[in-house]
Image (spheres, rainbow, N blue to C red):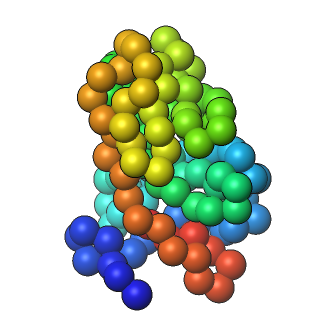
Amino acid sequence: MKENQSGQWYRAASTLEIEDDDVLGVVVGDRGEHEVALYKIQGKYYATADRCTHQTARLSDGLVIDDCIECPLHQGRFHVPTGRAKSAPVSIHLKTYPTKVEQGAVFV
Ligand code: FES
């Protein structure tokens, strides 16, 4: 299985912690240095940075709409699978992370 960019997988959540078509904010990393928004969309898991690129709202407080996340602060939208900025006021893409599921847990 392919590892993430840092070559290390982090356990992000139990698969039971996230509903379908929803988002969950998690903190991962050896020193808790990565704030990640974890999504389950149509049965697949995705992960992006949790901070909006417009200002610093938490996307995990936003709404999942189809395969996009809507920021709770100014309603900018990002395409979750690619991180692409989809609608104003966001214009800078989101960082995305690979995910995998093992033994009932989601790893990023
Ligand atoms: Fe997210 Fe403004 S902080 S759209």
Q: Is residue 6 visible?
A: yes
Query: Residue at 47% across / 39% down in the picture?
Result: 79
Q: Where is residue 10 shown, x and y percent of the image? A: 43, 71
Residues 99 and 85: in front is 85
Q: Is residue 50 above or below residue 47?
A: above
Would residue 58 be seen by someone viewing this image from the given angle? Answer: no
Residue at image x 55%, y 26%? 70
Vertical arrangement, residue 48 with respect to residue 8, above or below: above
Please give left or right for residue 22 compared with residue 29 in the image: right
Q: Residue at x 51, y 74 (%)?
A: 100
Instruction: Tell me the quadrant of the picture where the N terminus can be found.
Output: bottom left
**Rendered location of residue 107, percent (x, y):** 50, 71
Dividing the picture into quarters, in which one does residue 61 lie?
Answer: top right
Spot occupied by residue 64 in the image (x, y as percentages of width and height): 64, 36
Q: Residue farthest to the left? A: 6
Quadrant housing residue 92: top left
Q: Quadrant of the C terminus?
A: bottom left
Judging depth in this view, the residue of 60 and 64 nearest the camera is 64
Quarter occupied by residue 90: top left
Q: Position of residue 22 (x, y in %)?
A: 69, 45
For the point 65% across and 55% down, the residue is 40
Q: Give the number of callouts.
A: 0
